[in-house]
Image: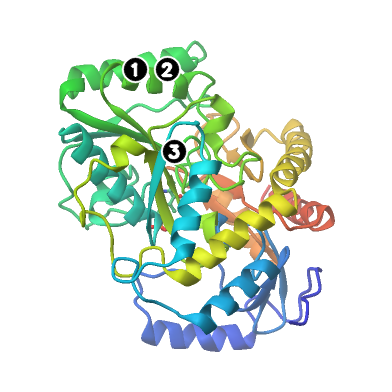
Amino acid sequence: MTSLPQTRHLATAVPGPRSQALMSRKQAAVSAGVATTMPVFARRAEGGIVEDIDGNRFIDLGSGIAVTSVGSSAPLVVDAVVDQVRSFTHTCFMVTPYESYVAVAEQLARLTPGDHEKRSALFNSGSEAVENAVKIARAFTGKDAIVAFDHAYHGRTNLTMALTAKNMPYKHGFGPFAGEVYRAPMSYPFRDVADVDGAAAARRAIAMVEAQVGADNLAAVIIEPIQGEGGFIVPAPGFLADVAAWCRANGVLFVADEVQSGFGRTGTWFAIEHEDVVPDLIVSAKGIAGGLPLSAVTGRAEIMDAVHAGGLGGTYGGNPLACAAALAVIETIEGEGYLGRAREIESVFRERLSKLQEADARIGDVRGRGAMIAVELVDPTSGNPDAALARAVAAYAHGEGVITLTCGTWGNVLRFLPPLSISDALLHEGIDVVAAGLEAAR
Ligand SMILES: *Cc1c(COP(=O)(O)O)cnc(C)c1O
């Protein structure tokens, strides 16, 4: 494996001729419903760099949406997958099981919060795992209703579209959606009025749930400890703990969707640890297997074991290549000290972004944890979301060789999700480009 130079480099205009030609082939062959953030096609990726087929090298502030946290093609992951692919590619765990699936479940029991007895089940995508968490919660509680929150994102399958809050592009025209899903108000410190602290936001959500759903009908509350697609919203301190305490007192399961915020992204294995909450069920995906498709539901043994034999599974769930990759990801995060690295990345971003904010009233909020950091862009006079500005800055960065993503219910949040393998030099250079994009859009 030749290593990819860890430098930003523009060999052509962005997109270059090869990417342009491939984009025409894409248009002729791939559904228009599958859109791309970047106008370029990837050739290689490693460390903090993605190289395209025209030889342009981009600073990666996206990690393929929080997936390649250990870097793309991380050495231990490559070796583990190559070894596994030579032994066997698939037997189906439900037909002829294999050790790596069990080993991943053992690791999840060790790494997830709480020292109670745990069990896991493995799946392919975040959406599939969220759906299974709902199945498990209903089987255990014998109840139907599920509460999700404003700004939530839980996936694109039918049940997870129902859980997801945002219409465009995730739900528009795709209904009818699954029933017995209710939405509660989120704690959103930047947009809540000043006296709505964590406890007050929890009271507001619980009051709505009690009035409109009723604990006797409610199987589970599902929440992202830091909301991802919804805008990197970090709830006020105490909010998650108070909601979890209400759940425990009322026979309702508390499910943490850590698909984006988990697996070291925020400087702890799971973001909920920052709030000292132990969820009943925890959903992992994205960063779990370094780019191979894998997801998991991990939870209290009595809940996970309440499902009848054969009730959980799927042809590919816990595929051996993905399990081998996940074990190598865990070894890499621990061996490289990547939890600490995520906290270092947070301090680099916080310092730079707060300085930018002091001089730029369009930066309404800087928030996030670890290597999951965002700025919310607003109209300085009205405070209204400024999605056009977020789009302009992202497009500028793309043209200058930096991969950045936007998010948020109103599309006005620039989010940063670098691989934990990125260097400080690339981080600073990436932030310089974002700052120049903000200036260019003045
Ligand atoms: C991405 C995401 C999902 C869906 O995962 P897929 O693998 O895309 O199905 C669910 N929940 C959260 C919080 C996510 O960020």
Spatial distance from mark 3 to mark 1, Cα to Cα?
17 Å
Q: Residues within 10 Å of mark 1 (few under 14, many from 20)?
A: some
- Above/below status of 99 relative to 411: below
Q: Residue furthest right?
A: 425
Q: Which amino acid, by three-letter code, is at mark 1?
A: Trp
Residue hosting label 3: 224
Residue hosting label 1: 246
Q: Residues within 10 Å of mark 3 (few under 14, many from 20)?
A: many
Residue hosting label 2: 242
Q: Is residue 50 visible?
A: no
Q: Is residue 168 left or right of residue 429?
A: left
Label 2 near label 3: C-beta < 8 Å?
no
Give how far across and how far down residue 312 sits, in percent.
26, 55
Q: Which amino acid, by three-letter code, is at mark 3?
A: Glu
Q: Secondary structure at mark 3?
A: loop
Give how far across and how far down residue 219 sits, in percent.
23, 32
Give how far across and how far down residue 377 sits, in percent.
58, 40
Q: Is mark 3 within 8 Å of ligand 1?
A: yes
- Report the mark closest to the observer, 3 or 1: 1
